[in-house]
Image (cartoon, rainbow, N blue to C red):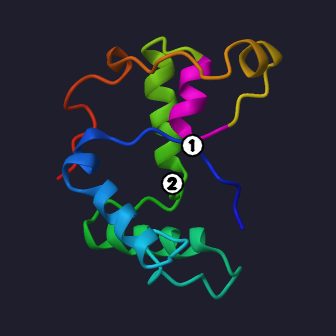
Amino acid sequence: MAAARIIPIHKTLLDLGLLRLVAHRKAQGQEWLFPEIERCAAKGRLSGTFTKTFTYYRIAEGVYDPLRDFHALRTNFNVMLKRRHCPLEIRKRLIGHELKDVTEEHYDPEGSPIVECHIPEGSMAVS
């Protein structure tokens, strides 16, 4: 199983009822938010299923680039934040990576607030 990650949730997903879905799944006794998603046959991982689905989607939309995979989204997101001078600590939190820095881990355990100025309104619209 992949490591548990603490990540921020976009306001649009909250507005669409993501937390209601979380509560519903918990009430059903489910451990997974989307239990119907099957593991990829090749490696037995959920990420393989997402990668395949995302690849099919990109082909269908005419934007497929064989040099960019599912993780390219995270790479592009990180680069965008870095160019906006977003601190590494906040970038790590947004991407879902742990802070291994002693100062952050022990002397700021709750972390600095993630300010909205790093992600301009409408720059990552969901449609």
Tell me which residue sits at (44%, 58%) in the image.
65
How many numbered circles are shown? 2
| Residue 47 x %, y % | 58, 68
Q: Residues within 10 Å of mark 1 (few under 14, many from 20)?
A: few
Q: Left or right: where does residue 47 sit relative to residue 62?
A: right
Note whether 51 is above or below 101 in the view shown.
Answer: below
Identify the residue at the far right of this view: 102
Q: Left or right: where does residue 77 sit relative to residue 18?
A: right
Q: Is residue 61 magenta?
A: no
**Hey, what amino acid is under mark 1?**
Ile
Tell me the residue that label 1 is attached to.
6
Tell me which residue sits at (26%, 39%) in the image.
11
Q: Earlier in the sequence, mark 2 or mark 1?
A: 1
| Residue 54 x %, y % | 41, 67
Tell me the residue that label 2 is attached to.
68
Q: Left or right: where does residue 18 sit relative to residue 84?
A: left
Q: What segment carries the magenta color?
A: 88-97
Q: Whole-Å distance between the Cαs marked 2 and 1?
A: 25 Å
The rendered magenta stretch, by its main secondary structure, is classed as helix
Note whether 61 is above or below 6 in the view shown.
Answer: below
